[in-house]
Image (tube, rainbow, N blue to C red):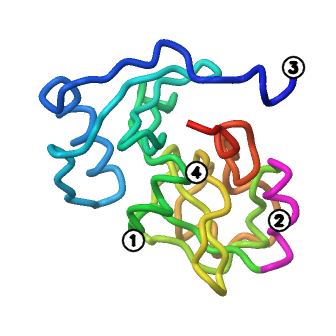
Amino acid sequence: MGVSDKRLRRRTPVRFKHVRDDLSELMSSVGLDLDLSESFLERAHFEGRDLILVDRVPLGMRMETDDGHSWFPTLRGIVTWRPDRCWAAVDHGAIPFLMNGADCMGAGIHMADPSLEEGDLVWVRDQEHGKPLAMGLALVSGEEMVEMANGKAIQTLHWVGDDLWELDA
């Protein structure tokens, strides 16, 4: 299946009041407080995931977590909103692997949000420039990630260059 075959399904404009709770969860997941009541909001479905589009761009997605479902920004959402919570920073050696969808190994992580807990959704950024590279599920706490010498620290769920990133809304 080529990228052209993959597109948003069930795309529907929605009123702010109908997605207020989901947007609130999305914002609180990364410590943001934004007013999106004047934005053009849509719900859609892509590759088995529910999305929230803000001004025609998929900025939030509903993810499976250990305790059910959680809303979290897509990488485009992270680029747009620049949150300062729920992150881990990797050295440049990890970048090519992450760009191919590999899980994030603990050895490449040099800094992480100390409030991260195992099972949290986390976004991975380039240590030097702070640019988002991937997002996934923390397999250990933020403090453990920084201490790790080997093993997986983050299970990658979405990365720059995947179908969701390449999606032309």
Q: CA distance from mark 4 to mark 1?
A: 16 Å
Q: CA distance from mark 2 to mark 4?
A: 15 Å
**The quadrant where residue 137 appears:** top right
Labels 1 and 2: the sequence-earlier one: 1
Name the residue nearer the viewer: 131 or 135: 131
Labels 2 and 3: the sequence-earlier one: 3
Point out the frontmost of discs 1 and 2.
1
Amino acid type, callout 3: Met
In reply to whether residue 94 is colored magenta, the answer given is yes
Is the residue marked by circle 2 packed among few (<14), some (14-19), or many (20+) residues within 10 Å? few
Labels 2 and 4: the sequence-earlier one: 4
Name the residue nearer the viewer: 17 or 7: 7
Is the residue marked by circle 4 packed among few (<14), some (14-19), or many (20+) residues within 10 Å? many
Which quarter shows the N terminus?
top right
Is the residue marked by circle 3 packed among few (<14), some (14-19), or many (20+) residues within 10 Å? few
**x and y, in percent, of residue 129 in the image:** 62, 84
Q: CA distance from mark 2 to mark 3?
A: 35 Å
Is the residue marked by circle 1 packed among few (<14), some (14-19), or many (20+) residues within 10 Å? few
Labels 4 and 1: the sequence-earlier one: 1
Q: CA distance from mark 4 to mark 3?
A: 30 Å
Amino acid type, callout 4: Ala
Q: Which mark is residue 138?
A: 4
Give me the residue at 17% from left, 34% from top: 20
Provide the secondary structure element on which disc 1 rests.
loop
Give me the residue at 78% from left, 61% from top: 105
Magenta part of the chain: 92-101
Q: Which residue is mark 1?
A: 84
**x and y, in percent, of residue 10 in the image:** 47, 12
Q: Which residue is mark 3?
A: 1
Give me the residue at 44% from left, 45% from top: 59
**x and y, in percent, of residue 164 in the image:** 65, 38
